[in-house]
Image (cartoon, rainbow, N blue to C red):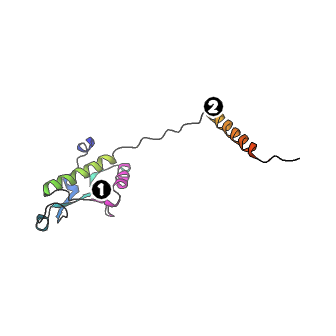
Amino acid sequence: MSNSESWAIPEEALKESFIAASGPGGQNVNKVATAVQLRCSVFKLGLSPLVYARLKELAGSRMNSEGEIIITARTYRTQEANREDARARLADLVARAHIRKAKRIKTKVSRAAKARRVEAKSQRGAVKQMRAKPRLD
């Protein structure tokens, strides 16, 4: 997303820890902690209440009760690549939270459309009336 650069995340809001990763790397994954767990304190970002609500919704289970977003990146074989991936994903999440949804504009059914619908209903009723058994009065 192109907006991710405009929402720079302050360093004091981030905490990183490196953990052992599964996935690519062969025997290297048993020896080196290449996966990164990035924790971002949402309250230190200084977001407006609306943006915070959207971020909370977008983050889902990645946000804990202390108001931290936890992103784990283990796709790549190096710490640095996983670190960049986690930061990019966090920046993308924050940028998406800043995008407002367009308000829905209520539309009104036209009088002609209502007339067509009523006409179609009466025609359908007439067809069904013709299927009925003739009444002997």
Q: Give the range drawn in magenta.
A: 50-71
Residue at the image point whose x is 31% and y is 63% from the top: 66
Residue at which label 2 appears? 112
Q: Where is residue 137 in the image (x, y as percent from the top left)?
A: 89, 47
Among all residues in the image, which is located at the extreme right?
A: 137
Amino acid carrying label 2: it is Ala
Please indicate whether residue 52 sits to the left or right of residue 124 in the image: left
The numbered disc on residue 43 is: 1
Judged from the image, the secondary structure of the residue bearing numbered disc 1 is: helix
Judged from the image, the secondary structure of the residue bearing numbered disc 2 is: helix
Q: Position of residue 99 (x, y in %)?
A: 35, 44
Q: In whole angstroms, how far apart are the C-alphas of marks 2 and 1?
A: 54 Å
Q: Is residue 114 above or below residue 56?
A: above
Q: Quadrant of residue 16?
A: bottom left
Q: Quadrant of residue 70?
A: bottom left
Among all residues in the image, which is located at the extreme top?
A: 112
Q: In which quarter of the image is residue 2?
A: top left
Q: In this view, does 35 lie above or below 110?
A: below
Based on the picture, tell me whether residue 127 belongs to the magenta stretch. Answer: no
The quarter of the image holding the N terminus is top left
Classify 10 Å Cα crowding around label 2: few (below 14), some (14-19), many (20 and above): few
Classify 10 Å Cα crowding around label 1: few (below 14), some (14-19), many (20 and above): few
Residue at the image point whose x is 20% and y is 52% from the top: 85
Q: Pick whichever, 127 or 27, lies toward us.
A: 127
Amino acid carrying label 1: it is Phe
- Labels 2 and 1: the sequence-earlier one: 1
Q: Pick whichever, 121 or 74, lies toward us.
A: 121
Please indicate whether residue 34 sits to the left or right of residue 68 in the image: left
Residue at the image point whose x is 37% and y is 51% from the top: 54
Based on the picture, tell me whether residue 58 belongs to the magenta stretch. Answer: yes
Q: Position of residue 120 (x, y in %)?
A: 66, 37
Q: Where is residue 63 in the image (x, y as percent from the top left)?
A: 32, 60
